[in-house]
Image (cartoon, rainbow, N blue to C red):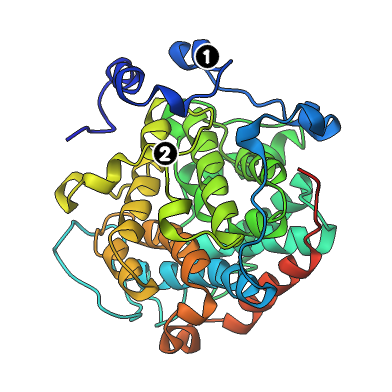
């Protein structure tokens, strides 16, 4: 069973031999050099006629009512997964199990309270709603208000903030808007993907805009290549789901410029793995693979979240990431009502999702 922690050279050889089609023409040299696979979003935004086929948007496949249900499901699902997973956060696997939204965990939360994943997602959602697009300065300022004052926290206190996020916000306060960092490989934590849903909902009509802003919101705190790649892949998956794709289509292998480890997640190697081969750490590669594995191996929101959360370790973030995906697949109506009723500020969270939906604008391909 291929381990994504294998050295990159071996992984690249495996892709070359088994999945050469996942890397688009024109990106193979950059892929072999394992440098950042830069996408020229600005050129494509100004010259959409140059857009490559793999970046064409997906049209709506369901009614507006059902698509809105999916959009609400993605954001509320993020929070629900977070609230379920926090019970097992930081624990070794199989030391304890969770079968409901019960609270507790390292922060002794009440049932329905959520952690940093949802706090950051709410900061991002508010930026879109109040700025009518992604304003990185506004987003960072909202993150700072959460960090310093507990704004957008489920209990009024900032807790569970990651080291890389803390460093990024401190550096932003010291250096201003021009600061972009956390570029080293060891800073490739999962904070950039655990909050991503608002970008995908707001730009649901455009895959190009979704990918560009999925990366940009991530880059506000996390600039490592693998963090950016995982934002790119998760944004692409959510774009398909938010336009009505079913699981097999949304999680099918896609052509997209990604570096080795993320490219193998895209290739779907997690689909053939068993639980003992899935890691659930805060490393962005582990988190995204585990979340997709949980969704792939279940058939409803409830089971996907419990499968993700019971992987333990960074359980809240794995379950929050799975919640974005499963929520966009099964919809708000697919989230157990008892969980929705228990979730702190559920009406506000679902209301923000509706505002993101209402404010989203159609784009040409």
Instruction: Please say if 300 is above or below 276.
Output: below
Mark 2 is surrounded, within 10 Å at the Cα level, by few (under 14), some (14 to 19) or many (20 or more) other residues, namely many
Query: Which mark is first along the chain, 1 or 2?
Result: 1
Percent coordinates x, y for residue 322 in the rendering:
41, 60
Number of the label disc, if any, that sits on residue 30: 1
Choose top left, top right, bottom left or bottom right for residue 303: bottom left
Answer left or right for 114 relative to 96: right
Q: Which quarter of the image is occupied by the C terminus?
A: top right
Q: Is residue 287 visible?
A: yes
Instruction: Please say if 218 is above or below 156.
Output: above
Percent coordinates x, y for residue 207 in the rendering:
66, 45
At mark 2, the secondary structure is: helix
Task: Kindly check if marks 2 and 1 are in contact, taking CB atoms under 8 A apart as contact.
Answer: no
Instruction: Please say if 210 is above or below 36.
Output: below
Answer left or right for 343 relative to 307: right
Given residues 167 and 127, the one toward you in this image is 127
Number of the label disc, if any, that sits on residue 47: none
Instruction: Please say if 339 is above or below 259.
Output: below
Identify the residue at horizontal 62%, vertical 84% (top origin).
347
Percent coordinates x, y for residue 254 in the rendering:
48, 38
Q: Which quarter of the image is occupied by the N terminus?
A: top left
Identify the residue at horizontal 15%, vertical 49% (top origin).
276
At mark 1, the secondary structure is: helix
Query: Number of callouts in the render?
Result: 2
CA gap, disc 2 and disc 1: 18 Å
Percent coordinates x, y for residue 149 in the rendering:
64, 64
Mark 1 is surrounded, within 10 Å at the Cα level, by few (under 14), some (14 to 19) or many (20 or more) other residues, namely some
Between disc 2 and disc 1, the foreground one is 2
The residue to which callout 2 is attached is 266
Choose top left, top right, bottom left or bottom right for residue 217: top right
Identify the residue at horizontal 44%, vertical 80% (top origin).
112
């Amino acid at each position: 069973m291929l381990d994504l922690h294998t050295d990159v050279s071996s992984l690249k050889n495996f892709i070359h031999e088994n999945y050469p089609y996942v890397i688009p023409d024109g990106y193979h040299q950059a892929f072999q050099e394992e440098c950042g696979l830069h996408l020229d979003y600005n050129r494509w935004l100004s010259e959409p006629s140059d857009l490559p086929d793999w970046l064409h948007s997906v049209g709506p496949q369901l009614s507006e009512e059902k698509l809105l249900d999916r959009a609400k499901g993605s954001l509320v699902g993020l929070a629900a997964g977070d609230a379920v997973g926090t019970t097992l956060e930081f624990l070794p696997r199989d030391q304890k199990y969770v079968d409901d939204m019960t609270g507790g965990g390292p922060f002794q939360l009440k049932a329905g309270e959520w952690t940093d994943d949802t706090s950051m997602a709410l900061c991002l959602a508010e930026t879109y709603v109040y700025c009518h697009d992604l304003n990185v300065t506004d987003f960072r300022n909202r993150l700072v208000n959460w960090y310093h004052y507990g704004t957008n926290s489920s209990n009024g206190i900032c807790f569970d903030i990651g080291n890389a996020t803390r460093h990024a916000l401190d550096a932003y306060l010291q250096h201003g808007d021009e600061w972009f960092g956390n570029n080293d490989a060891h800073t490739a934590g999962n904070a950039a993907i655990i909050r991503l849903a608002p970008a995908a909902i707001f730009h649901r009509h455009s895959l190009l805009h979704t990918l560009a802003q999925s990366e940009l919101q991530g880059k506000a705190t996390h600039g490592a290549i693998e963090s950016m790649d995982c934002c790119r892949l998760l944004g692409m998956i959510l774009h398909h789901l938010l336009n009505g794709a079913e699981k097999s289509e949304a999680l099918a292998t896609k052509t997209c410029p990604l570096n080795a480890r993320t490219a193998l997640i895209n290739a779907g190697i997690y689909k053939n793995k068993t639980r003992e081969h899935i890691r659930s750490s805060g490393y962005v590669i582990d988190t995204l693979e585990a979340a997709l594995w949980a969704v792939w191996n279940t058939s409803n929101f409830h089971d996907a979240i419990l499968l993700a959360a019971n992987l333990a370790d960074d359980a809240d973030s794995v379950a929050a990431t799975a919640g974005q995906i499963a929520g966009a697949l099964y919809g708000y109506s697919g989230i157990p009502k008892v969980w929705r009723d228990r979730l702190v500020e559920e009406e506000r969270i679902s209301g923000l999702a509706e505002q993101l939906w209402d404010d989203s604008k159609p784009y040409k391909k």
